[in-house]
Image (cartoon, rainbow, N blue to C red):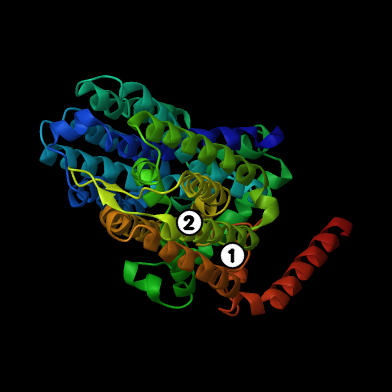
């Protein structure tokens, strides 16, 4: 880690915000299959399950919209702490639920906290990270999500053997523990240096940068240079300050907002949360009989998700954003297509007395579908998972970063809400057709990324003005950016020999 050790520490601690979302997603996916939970809430239908699952993401949508104002007003640090308190309240209500309405309210309140965290944490990480490790640092948010999923899956697997409502109350209540840890840990984390400069606290920003970049050496050249860059960027931003959200749709910011919204929507249209929320149901439909088997397969799914994110953390700043997204789209699309063909060609539908759908697939195609689910999760975890958070957090100038990221993050949660609401219905009604829909979307996203998304790896946050000032057709703008890079290198060489 070297001189960036403190930046890694701050980024890792704040990434616990991702753990909270991952845990809540994972814990609910397995609870949906618990007999004690079904009995307590009168066996919710596929529509009822969709409402219960998606109310968290409805809260996330609302929370992320308000997070931009909070992060600018209170600071990134205090906003994260506030979100932890809100999330803990929601988790406590869920754990103590006496009826379905109470459970839904608890999930909505918890969603408010998760929505604020999902916008604020990547922005905070990007602002404390040097350009060469920014992708890696923001990727920790996604890795923390996968750890949350993994821990939740295995806690659910352990508690499902309990034959009363403690089987689902315990895992829901345990969500409060990481929220409190993050709340306390943030007391010891620094404020964002960019936020400090924007609020006329330049001396404090200087101290923070020195600690993050040079072990406290306030005279280190890289510290002084970055501080000057931030001050100049803030000065320029104020000359074109965004006073309302309406200005985000005007030139020249509009293009970046559109790209940020598109990448967040496409991250959800990969279908990842359909797989994570309803994988136990899909595993059972595909032929994994017995509750233990489907929950165990979900636990393995969590392990695959977590391990596959590690390559992205290590090499995302070497691979680049464009190539990684294209590779991920191809991998996800192929996995979905094989899954759709295997299911569509061999399924023989039947229904249990309680309305549960069985596909009655032969063992060979059934195991192929399960392998394809794991391949899809691995492809997503290495690519769209981290970059869906990295890209929007790094492309906006300081004065609009929070507002713009609140819009892009809200679009993610809006589509998450829609997908969570309709997925259990579509899984039951069109089975393999849903896989085919996701495959088509993934193949289409290859062309969208190639045509419109410029490469942003190893760029300073202040460099983005140049990157996004050219043609909207990213594949045609490579020459201009290459000329800019050549000019920068020439300028650096002149300074070295001056």
Quarter holding the N terminus is: top right
- Distance Cα–Cα, label 1 vs label 2: 44 Å
Give 68 or 201, whichever is nearer the viewer. 68
Q: Residue at x 70, y 46 (%)?
A: 222
Residue 123 placed where, x, y %? Answer: 47, 50
Does residue 408 appear left or right of residue 317 in this picture? left
- Can you see residue 190? no
Badge 1 vs badge 2, beta-carbon distance below 8 Å: no
Quarter of the image for residue 241 reads bottom left
Q: Is residue 401 above or below residue 259?
A: above
Q: Residue at x 41, y 77 (%)?
A: 250
Mark nearer the viewer, 1 or 2: 2
Does residue 198 appear left or right of residue 60 in this picture? right
Residue 279 placed where, x, y %? Answer: 38, 44
- Residue 339 is labelled as none
Give 140 or 461, whichever is nearer the viewer. 140
Tag 1's secondary structure?
Answer: helix
Tag 2's secondary structure?
Answer: helix
Residue 446 placed where, x, y %? Answer: 56, 68
Quarter holding the C terminus is: bottom right
Does residue 402 appear left or right of residue 428 in this picture? right
- The residue where tag 2 is placed is 342
Mark 2 closeness class: few <14, some 14–19, many ≥20 residues within 10 Å: many
Give 43 or 351, whichever is nearer the viewer. 351
Q: Residue at x 21, y 45 (%)?
A: 52
- Total marks in image: 2
Q: Is residue 292 above or below residue 437?
A: above
Q: Residue at x 20, y 50 (%)?
A: 51
- The disc, 1 or 2, on the residue closer to the chain's N-terminal end is 2
- The residue where tag 1 is placed is 464
Residue 95 placed where, x, y %? Answer: 21, 29
Quarter of the image for residue 471 reads bottom right
């Amino acid at each position: 880690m070297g001189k960036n050790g403190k930046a890694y520490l701050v980024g890792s601690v704040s990434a616990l915000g991702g753990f909270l979302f991952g845990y809540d997603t994972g814990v609910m996916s397995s609870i949906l299959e618990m007999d004690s939970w079904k009995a307590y809430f009168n066996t919710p239908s596929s529509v009822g399950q969709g409402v219960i699952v998606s109310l968290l993401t409805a809260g996330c949508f609302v929370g992320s919209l308000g997070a931009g104002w909070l992060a600018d007003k209170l600071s990134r640090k205090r906003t994260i702490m506030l979100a932890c308190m809100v999330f803990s309240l929601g988790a406590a209500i869920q754990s103590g639920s006496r009826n379905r309405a109470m459970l839904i309210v608890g999930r909505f309140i918890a969603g408010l906290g998760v929505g604020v965290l999902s916008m604020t944490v990547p922005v905070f990480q990007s602002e404390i990270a040097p350009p060469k490790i920014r992708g890696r640092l923001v990727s920790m948010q996604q890795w923390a999500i996968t750890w949350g999923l993994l821990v939740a899956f295995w806690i659910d697997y352990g508690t499902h053997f309990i034959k009363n409502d403690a089987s689902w109350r315990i895992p829901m209540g345990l969500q409060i523990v990481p929220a409190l840890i993050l709340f306390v840990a943030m007391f010891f984390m620094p404020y964002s240096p960019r936020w400090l400069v924007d609020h006329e606290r330049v001396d404090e920003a200087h101290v923070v940068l020195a600690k993050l970049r040079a072990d406290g050496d306030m005279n280190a050249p890289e510290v002084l240079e970055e501080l000057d860059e931030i001050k100049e960027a803030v000065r320029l931003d104020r000359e074109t300050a965004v006073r309302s959200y309406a200005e985000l749709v005007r030139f020249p910011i509009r293009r970046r907002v559109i790209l940020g919204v598109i990448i967040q929507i496409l991250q959800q249209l990969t279908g990842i949360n359909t797989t994570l929320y309803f994988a136990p149901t899909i595993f059972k439909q595909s032929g994994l009989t017995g509750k233990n088997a489907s929950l165990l397969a979900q636990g393995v799914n969590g392990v695959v998700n977590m391990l596959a994110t590690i390559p992205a953390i290590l090499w995302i700043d070497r691979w680049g954003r464009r190539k990684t997204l294209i590779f991920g789209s191809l991998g996800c699309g192929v996995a979905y297509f094989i899954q759709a063909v295997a299911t569509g060609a061999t399924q023989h539908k039947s229904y249990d007395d309680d309305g549960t759908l069985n596909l009655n697939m032969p063992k060979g195609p059934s195991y192929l579908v399960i392998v394809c689910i794991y391949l899809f999760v691995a492809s997503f975890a290495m690519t769209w998972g981290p970059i869906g958070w990295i890209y929007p957090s790094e492309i906006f100038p300081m004065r609009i970063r929070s507002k713009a990221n609140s819009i892009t993050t809200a679009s993610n949660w809006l589509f998450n809400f829609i997908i969570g609401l309709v997925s259990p219905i579509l899984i039951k009604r069109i089975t393999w057709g849903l896989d085919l829909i996701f495959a088509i979307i993934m193949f289409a996203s290859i062309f969208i990324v190639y045509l419109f998304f410029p490469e942003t790896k190893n760029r300073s946050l202040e460099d983005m003005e140049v990157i996004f000032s050219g043609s909207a057709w990213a594949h045609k703008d490579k020459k201009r950016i290459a000329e800019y890079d050549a000019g920068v290198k020439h300028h650096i060489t002149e300074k070295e020999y001056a």
